[in-house]
Image: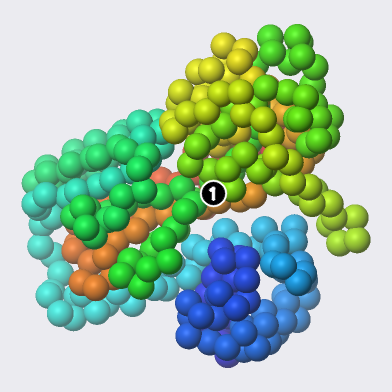
Amino acid sequence: MDQLKAMEIFVEVARQRSFTVAGQRLGLTRAMVSKTIMQLEERLHARLLHRSTREVSLTDAGRAYLAPCMATVSQAQEAARMVAHVAQTGAGAELAGPLRIQAPSSFGSAWLADAVARFSLLHPLVRAELFVDDALLDPIRHGFDLTIRVGGIPDSSALAMRPLAPCRAVLCASPTYLAQWGVPQTPQDLLQHQCLHFSHLTDGTHWHFQRGEGEQREEVGVRVQAGFTANNGLVLQQAARRGLGIVYSTTFLAWRNLLDGSLLPVLSGWELPLNHLSALYPASRQMSPKVRALIDFLVAEYQPVPPWDRELAAAGFFS
């Protein structure tokens, strides 16, 4: 099997955390998926995945390989779509017409609104309509040309997906809160703390942590007591800054507060599950040039490392 196909399989396994589910989505047997991953690991001389009876998870090498792998796969898929589109319709037409976009309210307000505004300046005949809503709306039923999702990718053959950026989760709290209630040293210590909960988290109040590699690898799950719950990340950020508790947030929301010290990272020696920021669009029809142009614009903005993570890395937040 060629390298590009192997990379596509690896990306799907990493996304689904399952050989079986990845195989089902790609039309392959579990045995073929497992064999391909083993051959890819042999070719790279690195172990990419931890296997267990319950699920698979990324090793450090797998996490390092995933982002460039996703970018390569998505670029190849997009190139094929572009060639097909040019063959059917020709190239060079000016972008125009309505463009309906839906995004989570936090990301839409913090990042996407500015990006869409700058895209609109480049293409004045495009009439962008941006809907920010944390409800997991059906993109097709609601007539959206493009939907931005953080995790929670629907299992639907009616939708195509292109990854935009990794989405790091981070626990943080205000210096005032930590001075009053102490700094947690282990995930289990969170049971003694006030936790601020985002109601759209896939596993609810069951927060997952991992650290280490190989035989030293640890995985811990803690079901926290949510003293405050909201369906909007910006609301939770504000509550955390006021000293209400420890918030489960994302770096695209928390980066400014982490840089200015109004929020401090908690349990930074542990990793939280890595989500991805993705662009969804109807798979049943040819992607319009304006949708493709906006996706390309966003990919250029957020890959290979999104600007919020670049700022945090420059300040030494990531080892």
Residue 104 lies, with reference to residue 280, above or below; the image says above
Residue visible at 15% across and 79% down?
88
Q: Position of residue 207 (x, y in %)?
A: 67, 42
Left or right: 85, with 261 as reference point: left
Tell me the quarter of the picture where residue 196 sits: top right
Q: Position of residue 105 (x, y in %)?
A: 36, 35
Residue 229 in view (yes/no): yes
Q: Quadrant of residue 17 in the image?
A: bottom right
Please say whether residue 263 is visible from this viewpoint.
Answer: no
Q: Is residue 77 above or below residue 3?
A: above
Circle 1 residues within 10 Å: few <14, some 14–19, many ≥20? few
Q: Nearer the viewer, residue 318 or 199?
A: 199
Residue 247 in which image quadrant: top right
Rendered-image quadrant of the N terminus:
bottom right
Q: Quadrant of the C terminus?
A: top right
Say left or right for 212 vs 258.
Answer: right
Model colouring: rainbow
Q: Residue 259 location in percent, x, y?
A: 60, 22
Seen from the viewer's position, the closer of residues 98 and 238 is 238
Q: Residue at x 55, y 36 (%)?
A: 250
Q: Which residue is mark 1?
A: 202
What amino acid type should be assigned to the residue bearing mark 1? Answer: Thr
Please name whichever residue, 207 or 127, is drawn nearer the observer in this view of the structure.
207
Q: Residue at x 73, y 23 (%)?
A: 193
**Residue 103: x %, y % from top left:** 33, 43
Q: Residue at x 27, y 56 (%)?
A: 139
Count of numbered tags: 1
Q: Secondary structure at mark 1?
A: loop
Compared to residue 228, the image places residue 148 above or below, namely below
